[in-house]
């Protein structure tokens, strides 16, 4: 689930980086992976909160 945002941000970081730096690709990949991790954690937490709210309202039984 977090792979598309990670790829997007890695490409974005690579495109906006300086051309003189030799480690641009490595830093772009690391930045993309970190953004993918943050995106994954955010969606996981928000889904857990959504499930908790639906259980509290009696709309969802967990199946």
Image (spheres, rainbow, N blue to C red):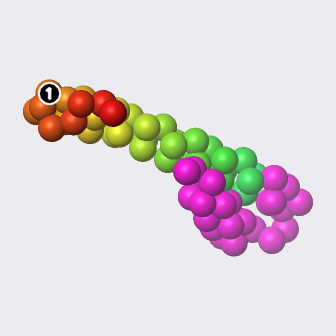
Between residues 49 and 15, which one lies in front from this camera angle? 49
Q: Residue most toward the right?
A: 22
Instruction: Name the residue tied to disc 1.
Output: 56
Q: Is residue 8 visible?
A: yes
Q: Residue at x 68, y 67 (%)?
A: 11
Q: Position of residue 49 (x, y in %)?
A: 28, 33
Image quarter of residue 23: bottom right
Image quarter of residue 16: bottom right
Q: Relative to residue 25, is residue 47 drawn left or right?
A: left
Q: Is residue 32 magenta?
A: no
Residue 10, placed above or below residue 52: below
What is the magenta segment's predominant secondary structure?
helix
Magenta segment range? Answer: 1-26
Q: Residue most toward the left?
A: 57
Between residues 39 and 53, which one lies in front from this camera angle? 53
Q: Relative to residue 22, is residue 11 drawn left or right?
A: left
Q: Position of residue 62 (x, y in %)?
A: 30, 30
Q: Position of residue 29 (x, y in %)?
A: 74, 53
Report the quarter where the C terminus lies: top left
* Mark 1 Cα-neighbour bin, 10 Å: few <14, some 14–19, many ≥20: few
Between residues 56 and 4, which one lies in front from this camera angle? 56
Q: Relative to residue 61, is residue 3 drawn left or right?
A: right
Between residues 4 and 15, which one lies in front from this camera angle? 4
Image quarter of residue 52: top left
Q: Residue at x 84, y 68 (%)?
A: 20
Q: Position of residue 39 (x, y in %)?
A: 49, 47
Label 1 secondary element: helix
Q: Is residue 49 visible?
A: no
């Amino acid at each position: 689930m977090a792979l598309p945002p990670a790829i997007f941000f890695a490409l974005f970081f690579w495109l906006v980086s300086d051309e003189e730096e030799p480690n641009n690709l490595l830093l772009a990949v690391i930045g993309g992976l970190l953004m993918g991790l943050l995106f994954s954690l955010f969606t996981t937490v928000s889904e857990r909160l959504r499930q908790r709210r639906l259980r509290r309202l009696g709309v969802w039984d967990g199946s």
